[in-house]
Image (cartoon, rainbow, N blue to C red):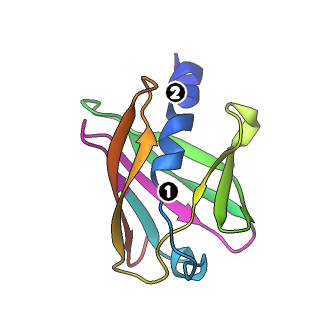
Amino acid sequence: MKLFTFVAAGAVFTAALAGAAAAANMEARFGNTMLGMRPDGTILKLYYNADHTFSGEITPAGSPTSFVAKGTWKLKGEKLCVMPEGGAGKESCALLKGDKVGDKWETEVQGTDGKPVIQKVEIVKGR
């Protein structure tokens, strides 16, 4: 069940990544939190590191517990691509947005049910 939850969450990772801005960069994410909020109540807290790793927690809608998210990231042009640890999901890429703490945006991502949803994303100070 945990593996299924982790695989289903693969689509959720994209939520904290997506957007579009040529000036966006990764620097604001280091030492801070990338917060994603889905309309169904799912919350993502992702922490990006300069060594191209990320970690965090994902709390599915209606769940009293969170699970750990880990993996690696890389930039491909203006896209941020993530790969969950252990290859539990394939690489997910999205246009990078946000270049300072406090930046907020909305983006359309694929939900765990495969349908598009609008997710709110924000770079929050600290971890």
Query: Which of the two residues, 42 or 118, is positioned nearer the viewer here?
Result: 118
Task: Verify whether residue 110 appears in magenta.
Answer: no
Q: First in sequence, mark 2 or 1: give its number.
A: 2
Q: Which residue is under mark 2?
A: 8
Which residue is pictured at 45% across the width and 49% down the height? Answer: 15
Which SS class for mark 2?
helix
Q: In the rendered image of this protein, does residue 78 appear above or below residue 39? A: below
Residue type at the position of mark 2: Ala
Where residue 18 is drawn, which disc sits there?
A: 1
Query: CA–CA distance between discs 2 and 1?
Result: 17 Å
Where residue 36 is drawn, which disc sits there?
A: none
- Circle 1 Cα neighbour tier, 10 Å, few/some/many (<14 / 14–19 / ≥20): many
Query: Which of the two residues, 117 or 5, is positioned nearer the viewer here?
Result: 117
Measuring from the top left, give residue 11's x and y in whole percent.
Answer: 52, 36
Q: Which contiguous range is marked in magenta?
A: 36-51
- Mark closer to the observer (2, 1): 1
Residue 25 is drawn in which quadrant?
A: bottom right
Which SS class for mark 1?
loop
Residue type at the position of mark 1: Ala
Measuring from the top left, give residue 78's x and y in whole percent.
Answer: 66, 68
Residue 10 is drawn in which quadrant?
A: top right
Q: In the rendered image of this protein, does residue 123 appear above or below residue 4? A: below
Measuring from the top left, give residue 31's x and y in whole percent.
Answer: 53, 77
Query: Which of the two residues, 35 or 127, is positioned nearer the viewer here?
Result: 35
Query: Which of the two residues, 125 or 103, is positioned nearer the viewer here?
Result: 103
Left or right of 95, for residue 103:
left
Task: Verify whether residue 48 appears in magenta.
Answer: yes
Which residue is pictured at 71% across the width and 42% down the height? Answer: 91
Left or right of 31, for residue 122:
left
Which residue is pictured at 33% across the width and 79% down the height? Answer: 102
Left or right of 102, for residue 85:
right
